[in-house]
Image (tube, grey):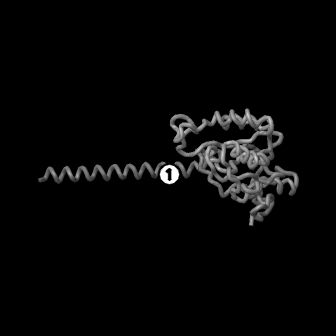
Amino acid sequence: NFELMPNNGNAAATLLNEETGGVDFFWQASDGSTVLAHWMQAHYTQGQDITSVDKLYQNVEQNLRCSKGFRAENPTQHIQAYLGTNGPVSPTKYVYVPVMSDFGLPIGGTNYPDPAQETLLQIVDSWNQQQFNTTGEWVVLGSFDVYVALVLSEAEYLQNRSYHPSVLFGAVPAQDPMADLFLNEEDIARTIFRPNPYWMGYYSSRPLLKILHNQINRQLLAAETLSVMEQLLMNSFKNGSQ
């Protein structure tokens, strides 16, 4: 049972640990190279329903247990829930809330189902004018690359995390390609990370699988085209023979 055990490599339990976790981290490869990683802990649609009356995660514990126990009735309560959930596990002073969905319309405006609904920019301005003085939290409508730049400006607060099969699956320690990068077992136990099972389907991952998928699609389309041509030719021959 990996639940709530931060030192066994389970991604959710590791990154949502308020003391040793963090959704922003450096993912370290066996050659020692690193890449900045960010885990969207409440899915990439977390902020898309900011204008709805909906149940949300209100804190990290609810997020870890996938139990939405807070009913938000307005955008301000939504933002408060985002901060309560994302803030404690953001290692820098910056918090990222994705506001997006598949085939989603921009929030507010004349094309929105409710034309009277505030736009996202108006919601942000309203929070900053009404809530900043009491919460100290300033909301910015920006892109992910802006967030990355801000996080990297405080890179000293980010941990390195790596895959350690010798710890996770009982392999012989000498077989662990990461073993030489850490000083002792305590360092390994603190930084182990088991990213699966999570979708890894973005553009540069699984290149061979995507190349083969593309090739077989082309072959199937070619076969379908040839089949249609064959039917057309056969029909033409039959009509001509009559």
Residue 127 location, x and y as percent? Answer: 71, 36
Quarter location, residue 150: top right
Closer to the camera in the image, 141 or 28: 141
Closer to the camera in the image, 193 or 129: 129
Q: Report crowding for label 1: few under 14, some 14 to 19, many 20 or more residues within 10 A (C-alpha).
A: few
Q: Secondary structure at mark 1?
A: helix
Closer to the camera in the image, 153 or 92: 92
Q: Residue at x 75, y 35 (%)?
A: 138
Q: Is residue 174 above or below residue 119?
A: below
Q: Is residue 74 above or below residue 7?
A: above
Q: Residue at x 67, y 38 (%)?
A: 144
Residue 63 location, x and y as percent? Answer: 72, 55
Query: Which quadrant of the rendered structure holds the N terminus?
Result: bottom right
Residue 27 location, x and y as percent? Answer: 74, 47
Name of the residue lying farthest toward the bottom: 1
Is residue 181 left or right of 71 when viewed as pictured? right
**Residue 104 shows in this picture:** yes
Name of the residue lying farthest toward the left: 242
> In this figure, what is the number of numbered marks?
1
**Residue position marked by numbered label 1 in the rendering:** 213
Residue type at numbered disc 1: His
Residue 201 location, x and y as percent? Answer: 59, 50
**Residue 177 shows in this picture:** no
Is residue 208 left or right of 73 when viewed as pictured? left
